[in-house]
Image: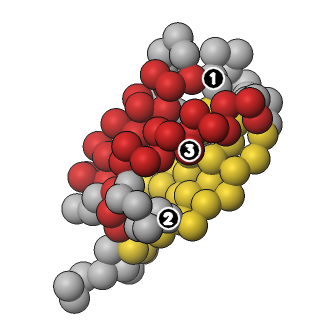
Amino acid sequence: MVNRITTPFSYSSAVIAGDYVFLGLHRGFGETFTQQMHDTFGHLQKTLLQCNASLDQVVKVNVYLKDIKDLPEMEKVFCDYFETDKFPARMTSTTEFFDADCLMMIDGVAYNPKSE
């Protein structure tokens, strides 16, 4: 069975397929990169909660930065949400965004086995 956490747009914020939660794009709001990162993680946590999952079950993320200079700050913020040595696999890249105020986005995959 496949379940979707829909949005008013042409994508789902998450799709649950078996033991996996596929997270669609999540972005945050705020004046600074750090504010947007923390807001994004807040949105991710809310989405995962709707899927009966949590951040500690996230196994893979893709982080898209508007500016590579924000990479060191991104590293610091990740440490606020994941325990040392329990980080998800990650790919980080830079891109332009449709929304001029957007400084970063995250998508990813969580593993949420039903048998545990």
Q: Quadrant of the N terminus?
A: bottom left
Q: Amino acid at mark 1?
A: Cys
Q: Amino acid at mark 3?
A: Glu
- Spatial separation of the CA atoms under disc 1 and disc 3: 18 Å
Residue at disc 2, secondary structure:
loop
Of mark 1 and mark 3, the one earlier in the sequence is: 3
| Label 1 CA crowd tier, 10 Å (few <14, some 14–19, many 20+) | some
Total of numbered circles in the picture?
3
Identified at 43% across, 55% down, the residue is 14
Left or right: 4, with 102 as reference point: left
Please give the label number shown on residue 1: none
Instruction: Say which residue label 2 marks.
Output: 88
Identified at 57% across, 23% down, the residue is 33
Of mark 2 and mark 1, the one earlier in the sequence is: 2
Left or right: 103, with 114 as reference point: right
Residue at disc 1, secondary structure:
loop
Mark nearest the camera among 2 and 3 is 3
The image shows residue 43 at horizontal and vertical percentages of: 37, 38
Q: Amino acid at mark 2?
A: Pro
Instruction: Say which residue label 1 marks.
Output: 102
Q: Quadrant of residue 106?
A: top right
Q: Is residue 79 above or below residue 100?
A: below
